[in-house]
Image: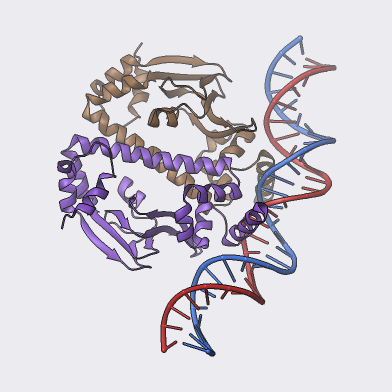
Chain colours: A brown, B purple, C blue, D red
DNA sequence: GGAATGGATTAACAAAAGATAATTTAGCTA
DNA sequence: TAGCTAAATTATCTTTTGTTAATCCATTCC
C-alpha cells in the first residue's frame, strides 16, 4: 500500500518532513485511478477531499449562469488540489474538477488531515508554507492580468509551462488566460508569424 | 500608548483573541501618521514591516520597465498590508505603497511578529486564518478576470466597495480593474447612459 | 481673481477581442 | 479505410479597448 514511489513524491509537499511526519497522512490516503473525463469534484459538493496528482492532468472549471464552462486552472504531477471554497470556508464547492488524461491520485479526507496536523507542529508549519505558496501563485496570476496583455500572458504561460501547454486543449488554455478560444488562435498565429 | 480605540480595532484582525494574546503585538507596534503622497513601502526594500490602517487610504503600485505606475490594490480602514514578496518569501519588495489620504497606521516589525506568534498557538491559528482570507480574496479576484468583462468588473467593484470607489482617483481604479483610465471613463459613460 | 496643475473626459484612429458561423484538421471509431 | 466527431482555425462583422492628443474641469496656490 505504501510504496517508495508514493513516499518520495509526497515528500515534495513540504519542507523538513521526515517519514514519521507523513506516516499518518499516508495511512489515511488512498490511491485512486481515473479515466479521462471523470469528475473528481463536483459543484455543490460538501465532502471535503484533498487530491494529490501522482500522474496525469486535471482541469478545474466553473459553469456560468449561461451554462458555459470556464476552465480556471490545471493541476498535474506532484500538485495538490481541492475545492478552495470548500476547504478554506466550509462552503459548497464552486467548481468541478475533471481529468483530462488517465490520472492517478492520492485522495485524503480533509478532516483527517486537520486532526493529524493538529498533533504535529511540523505539519502545521507545513500547512502555512503550502498556503503561502498557493497565495504567491495567486498573486502572481493577478499581476499577470494587471501587467500583461493577453498575448504576453500566453507567451508567459508556454514559457513557464512548456510541457503542460502541449497537453491541454487550447480552448481550455484560452479560458485560463482570460480570453476566448478564437482569440487565442489568432494570438498563436500572430506569434508564429513574428518568429519568422 | 495603548489606547482603547487601538485595542478595539486590532481585535478585528482575527478570531478568538483575548487582550493577553495581542498584548505583545501591541507593545511592539507603533502608531505613525502620514500625509497624502508619502511612501510607506518602497520597491527593493528589505526591511519587513506590517502595517495596519487605522484611518486613511493607501495604494500599492508597481513600476513597469517602461516606467509607468500600475496600481495593484487599495488598503483602507481596518486592513493590514505588507509587501507580499518580502513577507512571504524574503525577497525584495516588488511594489510601492503610497498614501492617498492623510493616513494613520500601526506599524510592526515582522520578525517580532514571528517571534510572538511562535509562542502563542492562538496567534498561530490566527495567522492561518489571515492567510486563508487573503487567499480567498486573491482567488475571487482571479475569478473576476476569468468570468467578468471589464464593465462587469467595474460594476462589481463599486457594488462591493461603494465607499472606496468614491475615494480613489479613477486612473488608479482603472489599473486595479486591469484596464486603462480612458477605457474606464468610457465604461462609466456607457453605464450611466444605460441607467436612464 | 487668475494662473497653474493634474485628473477626467472626449475625440480620432488603430489594434485587438468578442460573437457567430463556416471550413479545415485531426483523432477516433465502426 | 471511410465516416464521424470535436477541436482548431479562418472569415466576417461588431464591439471594445489601447493609444495619443486635445479639451474640459476642479483644485490649489500665489
Question: Quadrant of residue A111 in the image?
Answer: top left
Measured as percent of width and height from the top left, residue A150 is found at 59, 48
Q: Is A55 above or below relative to B54?
A: above
Res B63 seen here? no
Measured as percent of width and height from the top left, residue B58 is found at 38, 59
Residue at x 35% of width, y 67% of height: B38
Measured as percent of width and height from the top left, residue A149 is found at 58, 52
In this picture, residue A24 sits left or right of residue A77: left
Res B127 seen here? yes
In this picture, residue A89 sits left or right of residue B193: left
Residue at x 26% of width, y 31% of height: A124
Viewer-proximal residue, A123 or B146? B146
Viewer-proximal residue, A193 or C30? C30
Q: How many marks?
A: 0
Residue at x 35% of width, y 29% of height: A12
In this picture, residue A42 sits left or right of residue B98: right
Quadrant of the snapshot with the N terminus of chain B: bottom left
Question: Quadrant of residue A181 in the image?
Answer: top right
Residue at x 66% of width, y 55% of height: B190
Quadrant of the snapshot with the C terminus of chain B: bottom right
Question: Quadrant of residue A4 in the image?
Answer: top left
Q: Is B63 above or below relative to A185?
A: below
Measured as percent of width and height from the top left, residue C22 is found at 84, 35
Q: Is A17 above or below relative to B88?
A: above
Amino acid at each position: 500500500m505504501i510504496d517508495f514511489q508514493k513516499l518520495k513524491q509526497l515528500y515534495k509537499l513540504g519542507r523538513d518532513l521526515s517519514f514519521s511526519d507523513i506516516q499518518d497522512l499516508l495511512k489515511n490516503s488512498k490511491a485512486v485511478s481515473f479515466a479521462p473525463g471523470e469528475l473528481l469534484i463536483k459543484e455543490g459538493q460538501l465532502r471535503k477531499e484533498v487530491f494529490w496528482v501522482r500522474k496525469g492532468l486535471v482541469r478545474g472549471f466553473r459553469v456560468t449562469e449561461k451554462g458555459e464552462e470556464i476552465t480556471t486552472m490545471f493541476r498535474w504531477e506532484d500538485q495538490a488540489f481541492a475545492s478552495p471554497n470548500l476547504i478554506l470556508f466550509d462552503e459548497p464547492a464552486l467548481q468541478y474538477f475533471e481529468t483530462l488524461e488517465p490520472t492517478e491520485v492520492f485522495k485524503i479526507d480533509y478532516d483527517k488531515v486537520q486532526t493529524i496536523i493538529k498533533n504535529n507542529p511540523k505539519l502545521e508549519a507545513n500547512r502555512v508554507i503550502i498556503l503561502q505558496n498557493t497565495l504567491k501563485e495567486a498573486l502572481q496570476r493577478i499581476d499577470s492580468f494587471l501587467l500583461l496583455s493577453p498575448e504576453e500572458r500566453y507567451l508567459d504561460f508556454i514559457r513557464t509551462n512548456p510541457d503542460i501547454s502541449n497537453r491541454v486543449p487550447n480552448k481550455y488554455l484560452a479560458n485560463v488566460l482570460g480570453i476566448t478560444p478564437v482569440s487565442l488562435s489568432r494570438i498563436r498565429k500572430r506569434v508564429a508569424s513574428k518568429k519568422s
